[in-house]
Image: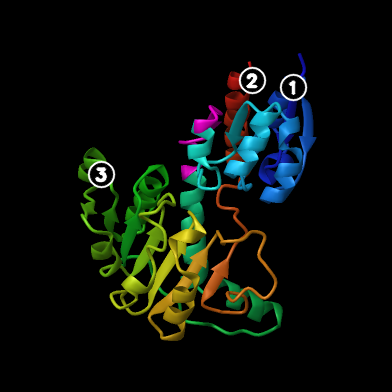
């Protein structure tokens, strides 16, 4: 029997490798659309497919219900975060939802430091100056000796901590579920309250999943306790910060920089308020988009799909 599969992950699509070969050899009827797809687009088509390999598409209750009324039997997430999937509805409709944990932590942790070093070493303005035949030498900063607050010490957070220690940074951490063995091995200080980490950090790395407790964890309630000049790095989910608070904090000189790989709406909308602000660096959700990781993550997404389709 041949199954109809919808593939929306652009990272999967754009990177050749073993993951594409594995999917091709299954003999499925594959339709490729470039996500992330909005709810209205999915509602028109989802019932035609037995399974979907998705990215950050809007898989709402209505989409799942429509899918179940047709052929849908598996939602395979290419990636880790499941905040765009209505998991309650999926459970009610008995539709399995899989993801790819334990795959992308190295490449995302590397991206945290790519953003940080680019910013504190003034790489972008220096490059632009030299390209314009100007020999302008800005004064940068060091990571060594700075205090890094890591909010979320899951797989990615742990890899961020390891790299921070290699740079000679002091590390403070918060997570609802502590890994005491890891903390002991790497001599990490855990706090019971995220605000205790936030107020004592020169740099904050956001590595939490997005849920009711973590939404806007960088919001109005912490603006008054942030260290002056703090740099915030977000490679997790846009909803962890209040965008207006970021802009207000920068405007008041409280936030020294916001470096993000994620936005509330992707691709970026025209005239986004972050555009043109030299205290903000935005990359287009590429933290996990390395050849090595795409192949590994794509392979897991296909294996998850095959398991439930079969």
Q: Which residue is mark 3?
A: 178
Mark 1 and mark 2 residues within 8 Å of each other at the beta carbon: yes
Q: Position of residue 247 (x, y in %)?
A: 49, 78
Q: Is residue 59 left or right of residue 199?
A: right
Q: Is residue 21 above or below residue 130?
A: above
Tell me the quadrant of the picture where the C terminus can be found. top right
Disc 2 versus disc 3: nearer the observer: 2
Q: Is residue 91 above or below residue 10?
A: above
Badge 1: few (under 14), some or many (20 or more) residues near its Cα, within 10 Å?
A: some
Task: Report helix, strand or loop for mark 3.
Answer: loop
How much space separates mark 1 and mark 3, taking CA atoms? 42 Å
Q: Position of residue 238 (x, y in %)?
A: 51, 60
Task: Report helix, strand or loop for mark 2.
Answer: helix
Q: Residue at x 42, y 46 (%)?
A: 156
Compare residues 71 and 101 and report the one nearer the observer.
71
Badge 2: few (under 14), some or many (20 or more) residues near its Cα, within 10 Å?
A: some
Q: Is residue 188 left or right of residue 288?
A: left
Q: Which residue is mark 2?
A: 309
Task: Report helix, strand or loop for mark 1.
Answer: loop
Tell me the quadrant of the picture where the N terminus can be found. top right
Disc 1 versus disc 3: nearer the observer: 1
If you read the primary sequence from the N terminus, does the residue marked by circle 2 or circle 3 appear first?
Answer: 3
Q: Which residue is mark 1?
A: 3
């Amino acid at each position: 029997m041949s199954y109809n599969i919808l593939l929306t992950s652009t990272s999967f699509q754009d990177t050749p490798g073993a993951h594409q070969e594995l999917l091709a050899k299954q003999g499925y009827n594959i339709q490729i659309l470039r996500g992330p797809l909005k709810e209205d687009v999915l509602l028109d088509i989802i019932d035609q497919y037995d399974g979907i390999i998705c990215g950050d598409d809007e898989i709402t209750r209505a989409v799942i219900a429509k899918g179940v009324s047709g052929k849908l039997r598996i939602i395979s997430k290419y990636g880790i975060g499941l905040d765009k999937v209505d998991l309650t509805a999926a459970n009610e409709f008995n539709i399995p939802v899989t993801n790819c944990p334990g795959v992308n932590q190295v490449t995302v942790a590397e991206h945290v430091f790519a953003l940080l070093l680019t910013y504190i070493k003034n790489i972008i303005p220096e490059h632009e100056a030299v390209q314009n035949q100007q020999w302008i030498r800005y004064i940068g900063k060091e990571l060594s000796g700075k205090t890094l607050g890591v909010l979320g010490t899951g797989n990615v957070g742990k890899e961020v901590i390891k790299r921070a220690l290699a740079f000679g940074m002091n590390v403070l951490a918060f997570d609802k579920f502590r890994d005491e063995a890891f903390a002991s091995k790497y001599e990490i200080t855990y706090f019971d309250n995220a605000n205790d980490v936030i107020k004592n950090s020169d740099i904050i790395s956001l590595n939490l999943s997005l849920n009711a407790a973590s939404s806007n964890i960088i919001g109005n309630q912490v603006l008054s306790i942030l260290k002056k000049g703090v740099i915030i790095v977000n490679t997790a989910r846009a909803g962890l910060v209040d965008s207006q608070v970021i802009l207000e904090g920068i405007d008041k000189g409280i936030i020294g920089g916001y470096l993000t790989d994620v936005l509330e709406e992707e691709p970026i909308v025209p005239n986004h308020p972050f555009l043109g602000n030299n205290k903000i660096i935005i990359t287009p959700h590429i933290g996990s988009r390395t050849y090595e990781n795409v192949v590994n993550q794509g392979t897991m997404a296909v294996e998850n799909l095959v398991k439930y389709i079969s």
